[in-house]
Amino acid sequence: MELLLVLVLGLLYSAGVYLILRRSMVKLLLGIMLLGHGTNILIFVVGKITKGHPPVIDETYKVFQEIYADPIPQALILTAIVISFGLTSFAIVLLKRVYALVDSDDLDNLNTPEEEDI
Amino acid sequence: MKSAILQTATRYLLPILLLFSVFLLLRGHYYPGGGFVGGLVASIAFVLHSFANGTKATMKILRYKPLSLIPIGLGTAACSVIFPLAFGLPAMTGLWLEEPIPVIGMIGTAIFFDLGVYLVVIGVVLTILFTIALEE
Amino acid sequence: MIDNHILAPIFIQLFVAIIQLIFWRKTITQRYLSIGGSIIGLLVAIRLFSRVYEGGILTMNAANWDAPFGIVFVADTLSVTLVLLTSIAALSVSLFSSVGLSRQRMLYGYFPIFHFLIMGLNGAFLTGDIFNLYVFFEVIIISSFVLMTLGGRKAQVEGAVKYMAMNILASTFFLTGIGILYGLTGSLNMADLSLKIQEVQNKSLIGITSCFFIVGFGIKSAVFPLYYWLPSSYHTPPSAVAATFGGLLTKVGIYAMLRVFSLIFIPDDFTRNLLLTIAVFTIITGAMGALIKTNIRRLFSYLIVCHIGFMIGGIGMFTKVALMGTIFYLIHDIIVKTNLFLIAGLIRQLRGSMDMKKLGGLYRDYPKITLLIAIVLFSLVGIPPLSGFWPKIYLFQEAFTQEQYFYVFGLIVGSFVTLYVIAKMWSEVFWKQPDNEQDIDDRFEPMPLYRKILMVLPIGILALTTLYIGLNAETIVHVADRISTQLIDTSAYVQAVLGTK
C-alpha cells in the first residue's frame, strides 16, 4: 500500500512540475492542482497508514489497546482539499476572464507594456 | 440541448438529492458526512437542474440569489463559535442539549456550525457556477 | 493564562465582513461599517497590546482542548505588536478607500473582502498552531486574489495570474513542509514542536524540511530568486488595495519566518549563510530594479523587495541585536510601505498619472500635502531621527560584530539606492515644472472638502505614526528588545502554551 502510494505521489509531483513549466495557462492550473493532490497524498503517507483500526476506544477500556489510525493527517487533508477547492474554482473563473480579455492561452502574452500604465 | 429524459429525471432527483444532503448534514457529527459534503450534494442537485432546464430556470426556482446564503451561513457558523463565551468557556467549545430530539438527534453547537458550512458551500458553489454559466 | 480576548481582533473583522455582506451593494452603509469596524478593531488591538505588554503572554485553547492536541491561539509581544500595526494600517486604508475607490469596485464587494483579508492577517499573527497558520495564509491569499482582480482591467488580471500561480505554489511548499514535519514529530502545535524537534535523530531531514519553509515563506515575502511575481503584479490593482498588499502581505512571510526559525528550526550555520546570501541578493536586485523604473508604483514595488532583504539579513544573523533590528524595521516598514502606496494613489488623484515623466509641480500647487509626504519619504530613506534610521544602526552594528561584510555592503547599497530613487522621485514629481500643463488631469481640486479630508487624513495618520516611531524610538526599542528576547529564549512562549510541565 505504501509503495503504491509513494509511486502515485512521485507521478503526481513530476506531472505537476512538468505541467507548471509549460507556457499554457490551463496546463499551469492543472499542474498546480496535481501538485496539490500530490501534497495531500504525501501527508497521508508520512502520517503512517494503519488499516482497519479506527481511533475509537472500546467501552470497556480507558486507553487504546493497539495501534490506531491517526485521524489528524486525514483532517489536514480534508482541510487542504476544501481550501484547494476554493482556490481552484476562483482560478478557473480568473483564467476564463483572462482568456476573454487577452484572447490567448500563452503565458508569454500576459505582459501589458509599461507604457500603458496609469 | 434539452433532453426530455434528463428533465423528467431531474424533477424527481432534485428533492431526493436535497433530502439526501440534509441527511448527510445531520449524520455528519459521528459518521461520514457533514456540512461540506452535504452542501456539495445540495449544490450538485441544483447544477443538475441547470443542466436539464438551463441556468435561468434554476435561478427562478431558487428565488433568492445564492450569494445571500453566504452571510447567513457565515453568521450561523460564527455565532455557534462564539456562543460558548456566554457560559465563560473558550470559543468553539462544543455544547450539547441533554436529551436527543427525534429525527434530528443530538442538538449542539457543532450542528449549527455544520449548518453554516452547508449554507456557505451552497452559496459559494452556485455563485461561481452561475457566474461562469451566465458569461457565455 | 486562558483568555478569550485573543480572538477579538479576528472576530470583529469577521462580523464586520458578514454584516457588510448582508448590506451587499449598499456601498454607503458598507463604508460606514468599514470605518467603524476598523476603529473598533484598533481599540481592541490597543487593549490587547497593553494587556500583553503588562501582563505577559496570553493563550487560548480553542474548543477547550488541552494545548498540544487542540488548536491554540497565543498572543505574545510580537503577535500583538503586529496586530496593532495591522489595525492602524487597516484603519487608514479603509478611510482612504472610502473615497479613493471607484463605485464599481465597491459594488463587487471590496469592503467585505478587505475585512476578510484583515481577519486572515490577525489570525495568522495570533495562532500558535502551524496548520492553522497555513489556513489563515489561505484566507489571506484567497481574499487578496479577489481584491487584486476587482475591476477586471487587462493589466490587473494579467498581474493576478502571476500572483495566483506563485502564491498557490508557495502554499503547496508550506503544506508539504507541514506534512513532513508532522511525520517527523507527530505534532502541529508550534510550542510542542519546538520541544519534539530536538528529539528527532535525523538532523539532515530537519534541514531539508526547513528548506521547504524557506521556499514557501520566501515566495510570500518576495526574496531574491522568488520575487518576480511582486513587481509584475503590485502596480496593477487600485492604490488602496496595493497599500494593503505592500504594507502587510509580504510582512506576514517575514513574521512566519521569525516564528518558525525561532521556535522550530533554530538556524544552523548553513541556514544562516543561506539567509544572509538571499538577503544580500534581494537587497541588490531590488535596488537595481528600483533604479530604472519611472512609474512610482513599480518603483515602490522594487523598494519593497529591497527592504525585505534588510529584514531577512537580520533573521540570518539571528542574535538578539540583529533581531531587534529586524523587528524595528518590520514595525517601521509596515507603516511606511502602506503609506507609500496611499501616497501613490493621492498623486494619481492630484495629477491623473503615476509616471514620473508626466508628473511635476506638486510642490508649487500643493505645498502642505507635499510637506506631509516629505515626512514619509524622509523616514523611508532613514534620515535621523526618523523611523527608518534606528533599525539600521542595530543591523549595521551586528553585521560588523559578526564580520558579515557582504551584508554590510548590501545594507549600504540598499540605503543609498533608496536615497537616490527617492531624491529622483522628489525632484521629478514635486520640484520639476510639468512638461505639459494641459495634460494635467486634476481630480482632487473639484472634490468636496470632506472627500479631500478623507483622502489626506489616512496619510496623515500614518505619517504621525511614523513620526511617533522615529521620535519616540526609545519606547519602540523597548518593545523590540522584549520581542527579540522572547524570540531568542522561547521558554516563556512554550511554558505559556503547554503549562508548567
Image: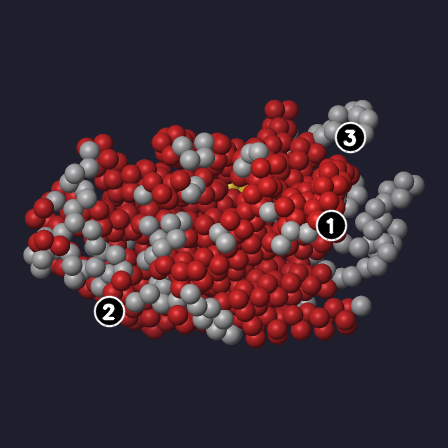
Estimate the x, y position of residue B128 in percent, counting from the top left: 54, 48
Does C193 sit above or below residue A19? Answer: above
Q: Please name the residue shown 44% across and 68% down the image.
A: A104
Q: Tag 3, which secondary structure?
A: loop
Q: Nearer the viewer, residue C39 or A78?
A: A78
Q: Do the numbered discs 1 and 3 sit on residues whose CB atoms are within 8 Å?
A: no
The chain letter for the residue carrying disc 2 is C
Res C355 → quadrant: bottom left
The disc label shown at residue B104, or none: 3
| Mark 1, residue position | B5
Q: Is residue C323 visible to us here?
A: no
How many C-alpha atoms fall within 10 Å of the one at disc 2: few (<14), some, or many (≥20)?
A: few
Q: Is residue C196 visible to us here?
A: yes
Instruction: Describe residue C311's horizontal placement relative to residue A113 as left or right.
Output: right
Quarter of the image for the N terminus of chain B: give it: bottom right
Q: Do the numbered discs 3 and 2 sit on residues whose CB atoms are within 8 Å?
A: no
What distance separates the C-alpha of mark 3 from that of mark 2?
66 Å
Type of amino acid under label 2? Ile
The first of marks 1 and 3 along the sequence is 1
What distance separates the C-alpha of mark 1 from that of mark 2?
65 Å
Does C308 sit above or below residue B75? Answer: below
| Mark 2, residue position | C292
How many C-alpha atoms fall within 10 Å of the one at disc 1: few (<14), some, or many (≥20)?
A: few
What distance separates the C-alpha of mark 1 from that of mark 3?
35 Å
